[in-house]
Amino acid sequence: MATPTSYLDYDAVYATIVLTETDGTPSTRLASLIKQSIQDGYADFLNSYEWSFMRPVVSTALSAGDESLDMPDDYGTLIGGVTISHNEQEKYELTQVPPEDLVEYQKQAQSIPRYFSMEPKSTSSPTLGQLWTMRLWPLVNQNDLTIVYRYRRAIDIIDTGDTFLGGPVHSQTLLSAGYAKFEQYYGRVSGTRTKDYEDKLLLSQKLDDESSVGWTRSTIPYAPTRHLPHVHSAVTVTFS
């Protein structure tokens, strides 16, 4: 089959492999173990290293009157500073302050923002899932400003329509991570799958290093986990 990238791709591969390594009879227990292996293997892979794809950079144009901006759906935490550029020339670094310090002054002036606070949203969009907002002060007074920041993605439960972070580049390592988990959960702990995963993980880490020249990993915190990893998906596994 083609290189797996989505949950359903991995689910199909695992189901085929599992039937060859067990008694070949589909069961509710096997289906549950496959789902758990996918989730836990994926979480282990993401938490095993400070991956470059877990730290995207966002550049957003601001408009006059803006006082806040929604953070990405998978926002976990900021990495480094937040900057605003003016006409792509002047650049200012914003100072982060507690939300309560910003609220009192937020609507009293308009200029180039110098301060920001991070606040959880009281409600989130059921479609977009935005959970955090960045508030600015003073309010934006012009249209030629751009705000730039880097953030670390939150680790979320993978679902049927989702694509795995790491994509085709690390697909074989992701597969091995799930195989290793299944080996443990099924009760036949030979260590073969675990060793294979460890070997592939080292290769993935080396590849990620080579694509991240000039970035110091020791300054980056581990990814926050939005949900507990031990949650069974509602996906129905089809054995073929």
Image (tube, grey):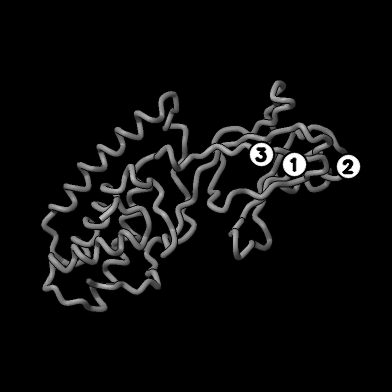
Judging depth in this view, the residue of 115 and 110 nearest the camera is 110
Q: Residue at x 66, y 39 (%)?
A: 60
Q: Indicate which disc, 1 or 3, sits on the residue closer to the N terminus.
A: 3
Q: Which quarter of the figure has residue 146?
A: top right
Q: Return the disc, 1 or 2, that comes first in the chain's sequence.
A: 2
Residue at numbered disc 3: 60
Label 2: few (<14), some (14–19) or many (≥20) C-alpha neighbours in 10 Å: few
Q: Position of residue 166 (x, y in %)?
A: 38, 45
Residue 78 or 101: which is nearer the viewer?
Answer: 78
**In the image, residue 42 above or below residue 140:** below
Residue toward you, 102 or 159: 159
Q: Which disc, if any, is residue 108? A: 2
Q: Quadrant of residue 182?
A: bottom left
User: Residue 52, relative to residue 192: is it above or below?
Assistant: above
Q: Looking at numbered disc 1 in the image, what kind of residue is underneath it?
A: Leu
Q: Is residue 35 visible?
A: yes
